[in-house]
Image (cartoon, grey):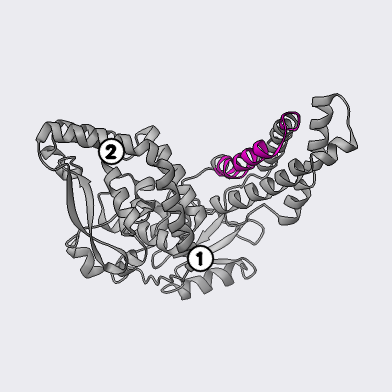
Amino acid sequence: MLDPTNVVAAKVLHAAVLPLVVGLAIRLVEGTFSVGRFAEAWPVTVLFVFAYLGAWSLNSAFERYPFVSQFEAAFLGASCAFIPVGFVLHSLLGPSLRIIAVVAGAGGLAVYLVDQFFHQFRESRLVVVPGGVSYRLLAAPGVTPMKDARLDSVDVDGVVADLHSSQAAYQQVMAQHGLTEVPTHHAGYLYELLTGRVLLGEDCRTELTVGERPYYAHFKRAIDILLLAISLPFTGPILVVASLMLWLESGGPVLSWHERIGQHSEPFLMAKFQNAGSGNGQENATSVGRLIHKLRIDELPKFWNVLKGDMSLIGPRPKALDFSPELVEKETLLEYRHYVRPGITGWAQVTHGFAVDEARRELEHDLYYVKYRSAALDLLIVYLALKSVLSGFGA
């Protein structure tokens, strides 16, 4: 993870093989290779080259985040790049060229996956300098403490230290073992890399830099509206049926409205199904409400808040105005949580479950999302959310 093995020049070279794959596809489908047929298939060649480079670019982005294996990153990157290209080619090409495109696509995808298979990361070997918050890394996933007396630039990939409070120990280790040419990483950075959380606590000094990303914000808003429009034929009937069932059971209003903290700490009213129940309120839910919660369609009324612009499909979960007063007193970075629109699901929910028990841990996840928010991270959250629904994680 610290030393990516993907090289741009190598990827461009591999992408250059795709015209050969198209030529072989023509030979397999038609029994002979024709230069004229190859010229007709130029959209296939061009689009699959772009799909390959796009898949590699997305894969490289996904690999920066924890909770996703290299195979999952490769699969997700390929899906996001090759499937849209397949739909475009299906609409552009005639029947005969479609068969060639299918064979070439399968071959191009095989080239991509084989390339990824031969570029596996190995485990990083790091020297952790004691002191400060370095001890917090020992509880991080994927960390195996080892004692090795042999430390030199050949065996070590990097040095990790809390540069805020262990400068003396850091200088001693570097001088004693001759690691001056080895890169140094701050303990907080490694903590983020391994856990997907921003390091918080009384024993650390965390500074959060949140840059302006206006194009991303507009793009995300447009995607929210587009996805709502696409999902309406499916979610609309579900909303109608669930509302009717609740009304028949209770005879009263089917929606309730709850005050929540929105973007820039502005309050808004969030819609929920009446008596759907969740968390500590589950015991007060009706039988239909419990069914709605179990099927997780109790989130659907929040689509109204997404349409209004109070919420997004992806972001930190909206909190009540009086949530966790102890955390408000201790954490000076809490205000950054409200830098973005709250979401129906978010990084904390897909990595730690929907029932996040510890307020500080949830905040660490939310701040990580605010710090690294991007289209790639949003795609990863969608994938992990679907995976959690199918596996029952976080229920």
What is the three-letter code of the residue carrying label 2?
A: Leu
Where disc 1 sits, the SS reads: helix
Which region shows up in magenta? 73-98
Residue 291 in view: yes
- Relative placement, left or right, of 148 versus 382 is right
Main SS category, magenta section = helix
The one nearer the camera, 205 or 173, is: 205
Q: CA distance from mark 2 to mark 1?
A: 32 Å
Q: Quadrant of residue 267?
A: bottom left
Name which residue lies at 75% across and 55% down: 9
The one nearer the camera, 53 or 114, is: 53
Residue located beneath label 1 in the image: 215
What is the three-letter code of the residue carrying label 1?
A: Tyr
Residue at the far top: name it.
31
Residue 140 vertical placement versus 337 (above, below): above
Image position, residue 115 (x, y; %) = 70, 42
Magenta run includes residue 95: yes
- Relative placement, left or right, of 97 versus 237 is right
Report the mark closest to the observer, 2 or 1.
Answer: 2
Name which residue lies at 59% across and 50% down: 58
Residue located beneath label 2 in the image: 239
Image position, residue 8 (x, y; %) = 71, 56
